[in-house]
Amino acid sequence: MTTTPMQYLDKAMDKVRDLGLLPQTGDKREEPIVALLNQIADIDQDRIVAIARTLNQASFFNDVVREQVQAMKISDRYETITNSFKSIRDDAKNMVDQLDDGKISTFERVNNIWMKATRGDIADRFDKIKETYLDVTESTLDQIQREQLILDAYQDFRGALKQSEVLALEVLKKADALLLESKTAVETAMKNVDAHQGEEPAERAKLELARDEKLRELQDTEKRYQIAKDLSDNLTVSYNTSEVVMARLVQTTNAKERLYSQAISFFSTNETVLTALTASFTGMFGLHEATQTVEAMKEGVSESIEVLSEIGGKVQEAAIRAGYGPTIRADAVKKLVDSVVNFQENSRTIIEEMRRQSTSNAKEIQEAVEDGKRRMARLAEQGSKILSTKSSDKPA
């Protein structure tokens, strides 16, 4: 009977080994449960060894399951599909909004260029949706296949776990019998002490020592009984709880497989719809560009005509005025005549005034010179008189 859990365990580990998930032998560490089970190994050596081997692999096997049975990147990559569809719709809506005011501003043109540079053409984004879908379905299929292998291996492992529970209950039954035996021995020893009537202290002390030893054995037996009980209880809880959890995992895998089948069916039958959407949105954006080109041409020609009507009349009128109008303006000639006449009038006035000043100035010079001459003559006359007087006064 002790070989049954071993067979289940070997079968489970073989499946894990086939997946290439077994660690190197040097990396394996003994689980703490083994040391605990060694304390009750003497109750039933074979059964405890079988249980220990199963539980020693439990931690590793559960790590394998936790690492392999997971949602992978589906939750991340579906957002790429969502965002791609959203960007296509938003860009189409922005295109319509740009037409509301009848013209595209410079800011809107820059946004259109930026949109194409960062998000790509509509066809590129639809291609990205398809590539993402194919990546997700490929990963999902690989995941489903691995989950099925893991679930099969786990079912075999749970068989070993159930057999270990059976062995643990059998060990507990033996531990319970040993506990009852120890309790009986303690009761007998206590009765022997109580029944002692002799007056020899040594005899009573021997009985008390025997009682204490039985009590110590009882405590040790009870401790090992509790280990056996915890083992059987927790194996029972583990098996039944994992039964529910694994049922949920089976439901998840089945749902994932259903979604995979639905995705394959949906895309394979509706790829033409995706192609039509690509062509339609691309054509719509091309139509938008052609429409704006025509509108730009019409608006440009119309505005040019308006400018020609405004500026052309003014230019032609100026040309006619220049061609048929006077050459030298009369007011300019009049100003020149006035300037010549005024100069002539002012020059006569200035000449007369300068002539008077010249005559007056000459007269003043003449008078100044004559006055100087008279003064010089008087000075000469006075000098002659002085010399004559001095000559008459000298003695003969």
Image (cartoon, helix red, strand yellow):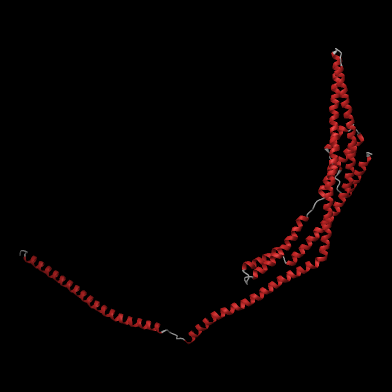
Q: Position of residue 160 (x, y in %)?
A: 89, 43
Task: Say if 24 sits above or below 291 in the image.
Answer: above
Residue 124 appears left or right of 380: right
**From this viewpoint, which residue is outermost toward the top?**
199
Which is nearer the eye, 324 or 262?
262
**From this viewpoint, which residue is outermost toward the bottom?**
324
Residue 235 appears left or right of 370: right
Which is nearer the eye, 80 or 166?
166
Task: Say if 171 sits above or below 201 in the image.
Answer: below
Q: Inspect this view and state whether residue 225 appears.
A: yes
**From this viewpoint, which residue is outermost toward the left?**
396
Residue 144 appears left or right of 106: right
Residue 335 appears left or right of 100: left
Q: Residue at x 80, y 59 (%)?
A: 135
Q: Position of residue 19 (x, y in %)?
A: 87, 50
Q: Position of residue 320 (x, y in %)?
A: 50, 85
Q: Inspect this view and state whether residue 35 appears.
A: no
Quarter of image, res 61: top right
Instruction: Specify the quadrant that holds the N terminus.
Output: top right
Task: Say if 371 sits above or below 225 in the image.
Answer: below
Q: Residue at x 12, y 68 (%)?
A: 382
Q: Position of residue 125 (x, y in %)?
A: 74, 64
